[in-house]
């Protein structure tokens, strides 16, 4: 993956164009947050379906529409599906361990985990995959794909294993810094190519997901044990958790891009 030179004559950072690109990349996640907000304002119709069931049906329809409308490529849809399944598996396990709970479990659920939650993980995968494509990401001094995959897999497995074995998130943070500390990301949103440290937008994305999690818990979609009686902010430690989960997302998207590049050659 090689970087291109900055476009001649490019002037200004282009904040409006950059914001527009971010909105396009995060469209599915933004829609989910809007649906969650509406679910608080609009009472759930009487019947067997709970609020999370209606959110699941709405999210499924929107995701299908984005794929059929060409908003997401087939490769991106496959990556999102894998991330959806990985997220749902983790939800089932975490709920069984009492890490958090769902006040409205709903009909569309598996072993205590509402299927809607998989779409929230899928939204993260959707954002990264679309941001990569729309901004034409290129990486300088990136670690090899096997190292990226190893970090992503270790981060994911640690979400399960730390309930029984020592938590290795600190070593994972250090290994991520070692692997990506020199990596430069170049991207373009219509104002010439820009070069930024890879870990900068990566960390910012984890922070935005942490803020979205605060919004979702305040809306009562799920609750951590310390939020059951009175809502309080999600602990900052969850910011680190999302950072590590983004490693898995990046590994999946990097594999997609690698396969697509091989297909073109």
Image (spheres, rainbow, N blue to C red):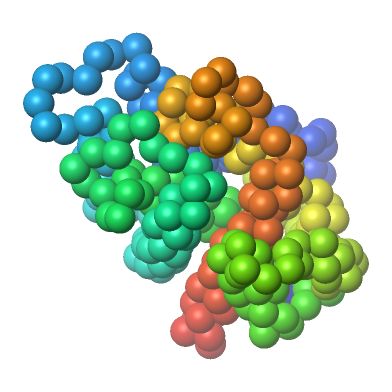
Q: Eyeballing the image, is 99 above or below 129?
A: above
- Residue at (80, 55) in percent of width and height: 199
| In the foreground, 101 or 67 | 101
Quarter of the picture holding the N terminus: bottom right
Residue at image position (81%, 44%) is 9
Query: Which of the 4 quarters of the picture holds residue 88?
Result: bottom left
The residue most toward the left is 47
Residue 156 visible in the displayed image: no
- Is any part of residue 114 visible from this angle? yes
Q: Is residue 88 above or below residue 178?
A: above
Q: Is residue 43 shown left or right of residue 31? A: left
Question: In the image, is 257 to the left or to the right of 14?
Answer: left
Q: Nearer the viewer, residue 225 or 215?
A: 225
Image vertical order of residue 241 relative to residue 149, above or below: above
Circle count: 0
Q: Residue at x 9, y 26 (%)?
A: 47
Q: Quadrant of residue 111?
A: bottom left
Q: Give the residue at x 29% y 39%.
A: 105
**Where residue 257 sits in the image (x, y, percent)?**
55, 72
- Relative image position of residue 166 (x, y in whole percent): 73, 68
Residue 76 percent coordinates (x, y): 43, 62
> Residue 21's x, y, as percent?
58, 40
Q: Is residue 231 above or below residue 64?
A: above
**Front residue of this view, candidates 194 and 223:** 223
Side of 168 where 211 appears, left or right: left
């Amino acid at each position: 993956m090689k970087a291109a030179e900055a476009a001649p004559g490019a002037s200004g950072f282009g904040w409006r164009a950059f914001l527009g690109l971010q909105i396009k990349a995060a469209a599915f996640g933004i829609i989910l947050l809007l649906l969650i907000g509406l679910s608080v304002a609009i009472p759930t119709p009487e019947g067997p379906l709970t609020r999370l069931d209606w959110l699941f049906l709405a999210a499924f329809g929107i995701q299908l529409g984005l794929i059929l409308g060409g908003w997401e490529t087939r490769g991106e849809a496959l990556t999102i599906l894998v991330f959806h399944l990985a997220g749902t598996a983790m939800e089932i396990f975490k709920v069984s361990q009492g890490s958090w709970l769902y006040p409205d479990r709903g009909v569309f659920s598996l072993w205590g985990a509402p299927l809607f939650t998989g779409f929230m993980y899928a939204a993260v995968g959707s954002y990264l995959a679309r941001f990569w494509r729309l901004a034409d990401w290129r990486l300088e001094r990136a670690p090899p794909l096997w190292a990226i995959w190893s970090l992503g897999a270790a981060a994911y497995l640690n979400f399960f294993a730390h309930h029984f074995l020592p938590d290795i998130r600190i070593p994972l943070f250090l290994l991520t810094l070692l692997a990506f500390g020199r990596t430069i990301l170049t991207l373009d949103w219509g104002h010439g190519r820009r070069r930024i440290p890879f870990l900068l937008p990566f960390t910012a994305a984890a922070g935005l997901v942490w803020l979205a999690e605060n919004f979702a818990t305040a809306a009562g979609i799920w609750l951590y044990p310390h939020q059951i009686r009175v809502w309080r902010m999600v602990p900052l430690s969850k910011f680190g958790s999302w950072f590590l989960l983004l490693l898995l997302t990046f590994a999946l998207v990097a594999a997609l891009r690698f396969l697509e590049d091989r297909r073109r050659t």
